[in-house]
Image (tube, rainbow, N blue to C red):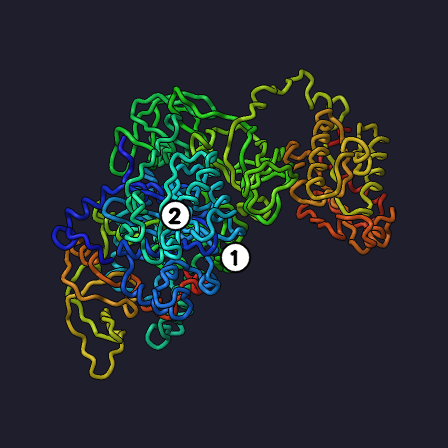
Amino acid sequence: MKDLTHLERLEAESIHIMREVAAECEKPVMLYSVGKDSSVMLHLALKAFYPSKPPFPLLHVDTTWKFREMIRFRDETAKKLGLELLVHTNQEGVEQGVNPFTYGSAAHTDIMKTQALKQALDKYGFDAAFGGARRDEEKSRAKERIFSFRSAQHRWDPKNQRPELWNIYNTKISKGESIRVFPMSNWTELDIWQYIHKEQIEIPVLYFAAKHPVVERDGTLIMVDDDRMPLNEGEVPQEKMVRFRTLGCYPLTGAVESEATTLEQIIQETLLTTTSERQGRVIDHDQSASMEKKKQEGYF
Amino acid sequence: MSHHDELIATDIVAYLQAQENKSFLRFLTCGSVDDGKSTLIGRLLYDSKLIYEDQLAAVENDSKKSGTTGEKPDLALLVDGLAAEREQGITIDVAYRFFSTDKRKFIVADTPGHEQYTRNMATGASTADLAIILIDARYGVQVQTKRHSYIASLLGIKHVVVAINKMDLLEFDQGVFSSIENDYRAFAENLGFEEIVCIPMSALDGDNITTRSERSTWYEGKTLMEHLETVEINRSEAASGFRLPVQWVNRPDLNFRGYSGTIAAGTVKSGDEVIVSPSGKRSSVKSIVTYNGEVEEAGEGAAITVCLNDEIDISRGDIICDKDHPAEQSDQFAAHIMWMSEKKLFPGRQYLMKINNQIIPATVTALKHKINVNNFAQEPGKTMELNEVGVCNLSLSKPVAFDPYKNNRHTGSFILIDKQTNGTIGVGMLDFSLRRAANVVWQDLEIGKSARAGLKLQKPAVLWFTGLSGSGKSTIANLVEKKLFDMGRHTYTLDGDNVRHGLNKDLGFKDADRVENIRRVSETAKLMADAGLITLVSFISPFRAERQMARAMLEEGEFIEIFVNTPLEVAEQRDVKGLYKKARAGEIKNFTGIDSEYQAPQNPEIEIDTVTMSAADAAEQIVTYLEEKGFLES
């Protein structure tokens, strides 16, 4: 029989990881962030347990600043697949009026995303949470285990990671501790796109180029997704043909000008581009070790 | 990602199709510190055009701050991820990298060079098909080269590339290269590699990485990249036949029952006859179910769900096998173990073993010998420490299905988990079954435990007194036995000091000996319980793990842990035998409470506070407990 291809091997590895969590963990959850990586992860989960449904709910941490299209896509996907969807928002943050404009990207992300995630995990008592992160995304991720342990305070200790050999995963934890599980650790951005193409996986339309009202700030194109976006004096949103390479809070997500309206064209543009994917994310710009620091503090 | 593949711009659909059919190789890089591992990987990423402009700009920026390469960009900075590593310029943990060429996709495990991180190297090797072992041409084969080659061999890697690096510093001298190649081939002769390829290179300048070097015209072999793109890996594991370790029983409703898992070897077709290990039950494959519909056939590496034609009992941990080549089964093994923890391995202590998707209690019954990973010599030892490799005998609480590791990396590997910390503290590779399980059949005697106990009008129990030296264990145990004797019950006392005069006189007071001491006493107590006796065990038994082991040997409810709780100051003040004085004076080593740890019970059945309670009252309390729990028939 023919050897499995690269994508088939990656798919099988991810499925193996998900089944292991379902078999051994008491209360798993899948972090669903509505992006293309989440779409792939969810597709893998459907495959892993078929004909059963994935034996865990989806959790979306809603900062209240996500693109409206993301929320629509999220609700429709959960309904269509008949999966339980939990949505959590940091209510304290909402009451304090936390937003990316006056609080800045770092504080907003910490309060509405990192803190909110910890609240949600504590509230439901999840002992394992799937995340769609990949090792090729960022340098500290490259060294993180597939089963990554968090203390009861949700901290990651990069110097004290469990050895992870073969495909044997140690899921034992003490009360209060939890595991972040990254079934797509070994995928690259290109693998994700190829797989979306091969399996015809649905992704939010924001990935495809379309006319959107945008303003340019510090060289980044920001889409004006609703009227909460404060405009500077003399700033007038321009209709431009743009698409997004990653999806997050709309004020923190840069658009790129593009004419790519089909999946093939997006992949073509992605392959021909000369800057890395995370550049569109404002939160990573601070300093090179910033992701590692955030993760130690509990960022997913 | 500025791939220069013309198809991307001209025919993206054709490009994607070509990409989907690429083959795949996982390899690791290893070698001594400063041999240039990270630089080599940075070079592979750089030369395969996988570095984005913004990433390169960041590295050029960082090179000025902390680089070690002068004017050239320090490519190692592309891969040294953790902040601590970048500051110290070392690689402390295995990092995974990804790149591809037109022919293949690659996953690279970049593993650390320092000796104290050897376990991380083993982690990278466990999933790799090929190892690149770097050698600094100026220094030749080093101790670290041997260690890493041994570990690669131990973990079953068959293909080795010896990257003789920094040849630029020696003007690509062919003589130097040949002499290192000869040295390497000589010592690696018995490591079981199928193929060793030596390549002269400079990772810093890129010689013989992706392009042939003009500075080594004498070298006629492939460049590193050519070799990686073309090396053939035989993944069909050595003639073991089909193996599906069951991971998850798929039961959406009463009409469907499937067994999900990843195929560890061979292929399966619908209609194939199968046998389940270890139960030996037989059936045949009804269907292979996937999300994309049923498939006729599936092979090694695929994550599938199979349905069988018969309703037989199969659960997680079982292996569905080709009917003519079932996996072996045993509860006694010889295995190579690599120790991964700062807490030492003690023969006799119980750990949890995760093997073929199940977790079961396991004990290392004997450490046959350790292997010096620097010169491969066998050395005796009583314990194993971090990064050490040894050959051990293991005993499991029930039989499991397995294959020897040399036949199958998936069904022959296991990890050991610490029961207290839950950490992965050891990893192992099964060599063979000791078959004691098959040969030594437990004598099924006609008179059983309950019959013997019933005659004595009692239920067997082991009263396990634990506490510091001088806490009053033996005093209370004596009183309890006297009371029971007066009530006409059948008892026996195993006392720490007395047992050490006979059965255990060959044991000292080191941690390993203490563990073995308790193991023997537990086994003795178990036999006495089988004889129907109420057995009183009066031992310091300082470690939680050993008391747990004793508990696990007995039937549910038979083990009664009695914590004789006397604070150290009080026990030391009483000092009935004068031992504390000697220990404080340094005349007795490894004395519990002074220079050896006492781990107090967390949930004892009975706790006696000797500061507030007299020995007589304590004895009364224990006998009352036995009466209330129904151990003594009236």
Q: Nearest the camera: B509 or A38?
A: B509
Residue B122, label in figure: none
Q: Check the picture and name the quadrant holding the N terminus of chain A.
A: top left
Q: Residue furthest bottom?
A: A233
Q: Nearest the camera: A34 or B145?
A: B145
The Cα atoms of the two marked residues, 2 and 1, are separated by 44 Å
Q: Residue at the spot x=51%, y=46% of the render?
A: A172
The reply to whether the C-beta atoms of the residues labelled 2 and 1 are less than 8 Å apart is no
In this picture, is B260 found above or below B239?
below
Residue type at mark 2 is: Ala
In this picture, is B210 found above or below B247?
below
Q: Residue at the spot x=48%, y=63% of the render?
A: B88
Q: Residue furthest top?
A: B446
Under circle 2, the secondary element is strand
Q: Which residue is mark 2?
A: B163
Give residue B495's position: percent from left, percent from top. 80, 36
Whether residue A294 is visible here, answered yes or no, is yes
Q: Mark 2 vs mark 1: same chain? A: no
Q: Which residue is mark 1?
A: A152
What is the chain identity of the residue bearing mark 1? A
| B481 left or right of A29 in image | right
